[in-house]
Amino acid sequence: MRTLPIGLSAHFASGATTLCHCWKLMPVAAAALGFTDHDHDLTFDGVTFEAEAGFEASEIESSLGLSVDNLEASGALDSTQLDAERLRAGDFDHATIEIWRVNWQDVSQRVLMRKGHLGEVTHGGTGFTAEVRGLSHLLNQTKGRVFQFGCDATLGDARCTVNLETAAFRGVGSIVTSEDNRRFTTAGLGSFASGWFSSGTLTWDIGLNAGRLEEVKLHGSGGIIELWQAASFAVAPGDGFTIRAGCDKQFATCKAKFFNGENFRGFPHLPGTDFITTFATREDQNNDGGSRNA
């Protein structure tokens, strides 16, 4: 049950209200942004809520239990803080969002209506629509470890212990030609075997994408690099990058490529479905034989 501040409760009871919505958007690695559907900027909690940004939200519905409550927020790309390039670059992925109901005559009279995270974002040339997921969606995510064949460590982390900054696992290259922002030919990786950087990471050092991290899908012969997702901005000849080796999370790769079998964080000897099927078949055969003998 939501408790209203005394001042706001009295304002509701007056019958003549001066209310608006305010949205506080908190990206993972950037300062908080504010937007309001009021016709003047409002300020509280150290954030200025920009007016006339075209923000609006679908009806807020709450349900009992642990089901995920979702709504949509949409807006025009008129704000200097929120533009298509930043959305396309993923700057707002999984950002925290708060939706407030505010008395614009006295912003101390406000109530938090919903808090969650941004989900899928779609946008065109002049507007965008973002899914707002309730906090209960975090309960759908796996916590802790899972028994599985593959390693559940991140290559290079404290559990893995592989040093990706050594010359064997790190390369520096540049773009020669590009088909698009996702697939290109590179120079500087000739000393590495084809596939060495597949499933690895690439960090842009020079170019419009400088500082951004990409996931590598394929490292092919002739210096071909293909990313899982297109780079946020245009890729051009001469753009420089640092690339680090990838791992397919298999025990054989851990031993042969990284000489790190003792730190493998999977369960390579876990019985699989073939073992279970064979075992069940034998049990059935034994039971049938027992019935006939009886």
Image (spheres, rainbow, N blue to C red):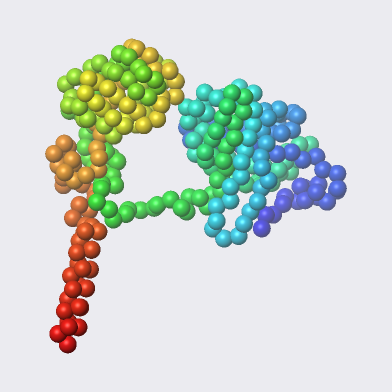
Q: At 55% from the left edge and 56% from the top edge, which residue is drawn?
A: 67
The answer to which image quadrant residue 99 occupies is top right
- In the rendered image, is residue 47 in sight? no
- Name the spot of residue 127 as percent of width and height, x first: 62, 28
User: Is residue 39 shown left or right of residue 93?
Assistant: right
Q: At 16% from the left edge and 21% from the top edge, which residue is drawn?
A: 191
The answer to which image quadrant residue 72 occupies is top right
Judging depth in this view, the residue of 224 and 245 nearest the camera is 224
- Name the spot of residue 81 as percent of width and height, x first: 59, 25
Farthest residue in the front direction? 292
Judging depth in this view, the residue of 137 and 228 nearest the camera is 228
User: Is residue 279 shown left or right of residue 138?
Assistant: left
- In the rendered image, is residue 280 in sight? yes
- Name the spot of residue 239 as percent of width and height, x first: 35, 15
250 over 52 or under it: above or below? below
130 over 182 or under it: above or below? below
Judging depth in this view, the residue of 104 and 88 nearest the camera is 88
Quadrant into which the N terminus falls: bottom right
Farthest residue in the bottom direction? 294
- Name the spot of residue 288 as percent of width and height, x first: 20, 78
Quadrant into which the C terminus falls: bottom left
276 over 95 or under it: above or below? below
User: Is residue 275 shown left or right of residue 137?
Assistant: left
Q: At 74% from the left edge and 33% from the top edge, which residue is drawn?
A: 38
133 over 258 or under it: above or below? below
Q: At 22% from the left edge and 30% from the top edge, which residue is drawn?
A: 195
